[in-house]
Amino acid sequence: MGLVTQGGQVVQIQLITAPLNCNGVHPPCYVTAILDITERKQLDHELPRLDRLNTIGEMAAGIAHEVRNPMTTIRGFLQLFSAKDDFSPYEEQLNLMIDELDRANAIITKFLSLARSRPLKLTSQNLNDEIESLGPMLQADALLANNQVKFTLGQLPNFPMNKDEIRQLILNLVRNGLQSMSGGNLAINTYALGNEVIMAVCDQGKGIDPEVQKRLGTPFFTTKEQGTGIGLAVCYKIAAMHNAVIDFETSPAGTTFYVRFRLTRQGDRDLSGLLFQP
């Protein structure tokens, strides 16, 4: 059953009712307890996804380094040949092979990010600072597709984060949004709500099909012609490592991805003043 708090937040609850000994009073008495099971429901949804990520991560750890070693050797020889006059007629082909090797190496780098199981080094930082530092890069990416990026950054508290991982999370979500549209505006909004810091990435694309929604975040699932299906899976893993969850809203007018960083562990919440959610 769902309830809506006075602040508009939807929570999932479980009702437990048991008979109460009232010394023979009729009608009989009952006591009802309301349990907040929102986190449990979220975990039930996220655990299968995290299990898949863990399996992919173990595969990545086993093969990625072995693949990179021969690639490095091949790239070195290609660079050596391209510097020789005898190979000048093949300069275009050699450069193309080097570019393709670099692209493959970038895919492996993303692949390896799924394998990171070591604890992250977290330091207290501000999410707005990381977004602002990426601003010029994001604006440059947007201009390539005739898009614009707009920032609305609210006042946020600092919280523990890994700078490199958070930057990767921001880049992946923003670039996904930019690639979903052409000639539009992408908005990046941040705000604090209760015990959460929220980042919203809003695009003006055509929305996400219902069948695709079910598979978002699944490793290697992609709708892009040149996509790898790794970027969003990495986002989900980075979020989980920062005690955050990712959800989204979509329509034909665009899609908004929300990353909700929980500043503290959520305990029992005050369920007074709740409105029933059908």
Image (cartoon, rainbow, N blue to C red):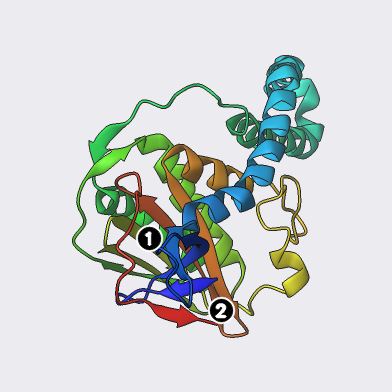
Picture quadrant where residue 177 is located: bottom right
Answer with left or right where residue 165 lies relative to residue 226: left
Decide if residue 119 is in sight here: yes
Comes first in the chain, label 2 or label 1: 1
Instruction: Using the image as rendered, state which of residue 2 and residue 251 is in the foreground.
Output: 2
Q: Residue furthest front?
A: 24
- The percent coordinates of residue 184 (x first, y second) are 50, 79
Q: Residue at x 41, y 65 (%)?
A: 200
* Residue at mark 2 to residue at mark 1: CA–CA distance: 16 Å
**Where is mark 2, residue-wise?**
254
Q: Residue at x 31, y 56 (%)?
A: 197
Instruction: Using the image as rendered, state which of residue 137 and residue 78 is in the foreground.
Output: 137
Secondary structure of the residue carrying tag 1 is strand
Q: Amino acid at mark 1?
A: Met
Decide if residue 82 is in sight here: no
Q: Decide: is 115 above or below 258.
A: above
Q: Quadrant of the C terminus?
A: bottom right
Q: Residue at x 72, y 47 (%)?
A: 228
Answer with left or right where residue 135 lies relative to residue 99: left
Answer with left or right where residue 166 lies relative to residue 40: left
In contact (CB < 8 Å): disc 2 and disc 1: no
- The percent coordinates of residue 88 (x first, y second) are 76, 30
**Where is mark 1, residue-wise?**
199
Q: Residue at x 19, y 51 (%)?
A: 157
- The percent coordinates of residue 9 (x first, y second) are 38, 71
